[in-house]
Amino acid sequence: MTVLATKQRLAKPFLKWAGGKGQLLYEIDCRLPPELMNGDVDTYVEPFIGGGAVFFHIAQRYKSIRHFYLFDINEDLVNCYNAIQSDVASVIADLGRLEDRYLRGDEVKRETMYYRIRDEFNCDRSPAKLIFLNKTCYNGLYRSNRKGEFNVPFGGYRNPTICDADNLIGVSEILQRAEIICSDFEECEYYSTDRTFIYFDPPYRPLSPTAGFTSYSKEDFNEKDQIRLAEFCRRINSKGAKFLLSNSDPKNEDPEDNFFENQYSCFTIDKVKATRAINCKASGRGEINELLITNHEVSKWCMTQEFGLIGGNGGKQQNGCFTHLQEASYLYGAVVSY
Ligand SMILES: C[S@@+](CC[C@H](N)C(=O)[O-])C[C@H]1O[C@@H](n2cnc3c(N)ncnc32)[C@H](O)[C@@H]1O
């Protein structure tokens, strides 16, 4: 057994990130390839790292993984990971100073300081300022305009934790085993072998050409990119790499939309329930289906101890070319708070 059970505080994502997968960790854990436990898979790749909820979960539990390769196209995000990896003390010192100044001010001073730091960040792209903005901006969003300027408004939260030094130190320790690369997801092909597990969490597929949350950012991910990603999955599948891909189910809005069934017809597609976190319309919040797509046989049990060995998806097999839509209706074993 290579799964670690530990009661010490585990490191968690240091940024809130749109599409964060904290709430789906149990479902994802149940669908990891068994080879992650016996050491036959020793390389983990995450091409859309974002806040990294799944990476932090896996890196602290599956000890047979020797190499971690994390990618994202967002330069500010990758710089931040790299700064925490190489010099966490400086990040903590800078962030601690920002936190002190911010918490000393009244509401008006805090708001003024937020917009000043936002202007400074758009010139110096400081990692500590990115974390500060993430903790104090509206909803922890990252959004930029066409010039690449971060433009999220002030959040106005009463007592945000801005500098969690213990967590940043834990994150830095974990990142010592990782390489963090700023590039398009296709660059990860180089690391894809039959000893690799890849977790893909791309930006959600927009329901209409203008509906995408990232429409105004430099990181637009459009329909063509979703198709490019499906082709890429078929390519790394033929190299023997194992993968799991998550996306929102377009049938939440349009029951006739068969995009994922068509693009991923060779793989297993499961539907699981999730709570939609970011939506400006009240009707767009609430429970929705997410898709979890795999190309491998999955472990019968969720192996992570804090979930309890109560779950599992019945040892569902994937052996050939068929689409398998399955409602996951079993109970959650635990709540993980990210
Ligand atoms: C849904 S988020 C990932 C969320 C992450 N799983 C988490 O738990 O926080 C998608 C990420 O993909 C990145 N991205 C967008 N287009 C990309 C591309 N072509 N290649 C690599 N990363 C990309 C975005 O910058 C964003 O961080």
Image (cartoon, grey):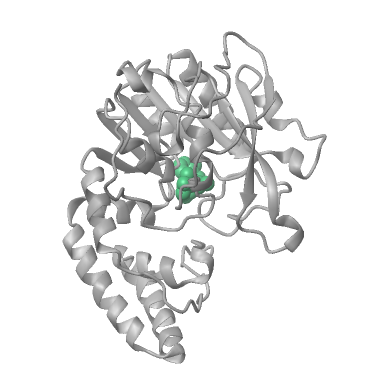
How many numbered dots are placed on residues in this image? 0
Q: Is residue 38 left or right of residue 155?
A: left
Looking at the image, the residue that sits furthest to the right is 256
Query: Viewer-proximal residue, 100 or 312?
Result: 312
* x and y, in percent, of residue 89 in the image: 17, 62
Residue occupying the far top of the picture: 320
Taking the spot 53% from the left edge, 25% from the top edge, the residue there is 312
Quadrant hosting residue 248: top right
Q: Is residue 33 left or right of residue 177?
A: right
Q: Which quarter of the figure has residue 281?
A: bottom right
Quarter of the figure that contains the N terminus: top left
Q: Position of residue 260 (x, y in %)?
A: 67, 30
Closer to us: 64 or 192: 64
Residue 282, percent across and down? 73, 63
Q: Position of residue 329 (x, y in %)?
A: 66, 32
Q: In this picture, is 194 found above or below 221?
A: above
Q: Is residue 83 visible?
A: no
Q: Is 187 on the left or on the right of 280, as rendered?
A: left
Which residue is painted at 32% across and 26% down in the image? 43
Does residue 61 appear in the picture of this structure? yes
Residue drawn where x is 31% and y is 56% of the image: 80
Q: Nearer the viewer, residue 135 or 231?
A: 135
Q: Nearer the viewer, residue 58 or 199?
A: 58
Residue at (50%, 37%) from the top-left corner? 26
